Image: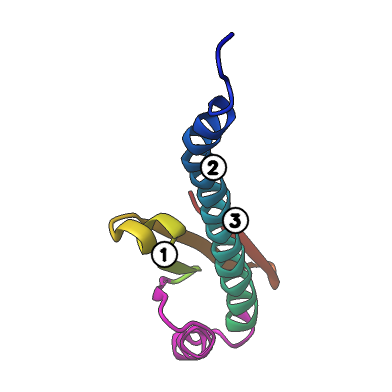
Amino acid sequence: MMNNKGQSLVLFILIIPILIGVMAFVIDCGRVIEVKSRQENICYLSLEYGLDYGEKSILEDILRLNLEDTKYQVNQDRENVYVVLEDEVDGVFSRMFGFLKFRVKSKYQGSLVDNKKVIKKVL
C-alpha cells in the first residue's frame, strides 16, 4: 500500500494563492464600486446645488470641500454645466506589488430646461 498522508497538504498549499487572489480581486472591485458611487453622488448633488445659483465658483467650492484627492473639472457654457471627477484607487494588488491602480471617472451634465433641473450622466 502507498502512503497518501501528504496529498491534502500539497493541494492545500497549491490552492491558497488562488483563494487569496480571488479574495483580493473581490475587495478591489468593491473598493472601485464604492469610489464610483461616491463620485456619482457628489457630482449629482453638487450639480443640483450649483444649478440653483448658476455660478461656477460656487460649484467648484462645493467640489473642493467634498473631495480630497480627487481631480475635478468644471466647464460651463451657455446652457450646460459639466462636472468631471477622476480618481485613482489603490487596491490590494497595488499595495502588495505597487503597480496596479484603478482609474475611476465620472462625468455629469446639468442644465436648466423650463426652470427644471436636468442632470444626466455623460458617457
Q: Is residue 65 magenta?
A: yes
- Looking at the rendered structure, the secondary structure element under dot 3 is helix
Q: Amino acid at mark 1?
A: Asp
User: Where residue 75 sits: x, y (%)?
Assistant: 39, 72
Q: Which mark is residue 43?
A: none
Q: Is residue 80 above or below residue 53?
A: above
Q: Which residues are magenta?
A: 51-77
Q: Is residue 13 found inside the magenta-colored segment of the image? A: no
- Where is residue 111 shown, x and y percent of the image? 57, 67
Above or below: residue 41 compared with residue 102: below
Q: Amino acid at mark 2?
A: Val
Dot 1 alpha-carbon crowd within 10 angstroms: few under 14, some 14 to 19, many 20 or more? some
For the residue carrying disc 3, how many other residues have a C-alpha within 10 Å: few (<14), some (14-19), or many (20+)? few
Decide which of 64, 9 is in the foreground and name it.
9
Q: Secondary structure at mark 1?
A: strand
With 91 as the anchor, is 108 left or right in this view? right
- Mark 1 or 3 closer to N-term? 3
Which residue is depicted at the point 59% across and 8% down? 1
Tell which of 114 and 71 is nearer to you. Answer: 71
Which of the labelled discs sits on residue 30, or is there none? 3
Mark 3–mark 2 CB contact (< 8 Å): no
In space, the residues marked 1 and 3 are separated at their CA atoms by 12 Å
| Mark 2 element type | helix
Q: Is residue 38 left or right of residue 88?
A: right
Give the residue number, with chain letter if any, for mark 2.
Answer: 22
Residue 56 lies, in percent from the top left, at 45, 84
Q: What residue is disc 1 on?
A: 90
Q: Please report the residue visible at 50 percent of the width from the left and 83 percent of the height from the top.
A: 63
State the image quarter where residue 98 is shown.
bottom left
Which residue sits furthest left? 99
- 27 vs 15: above or below: below
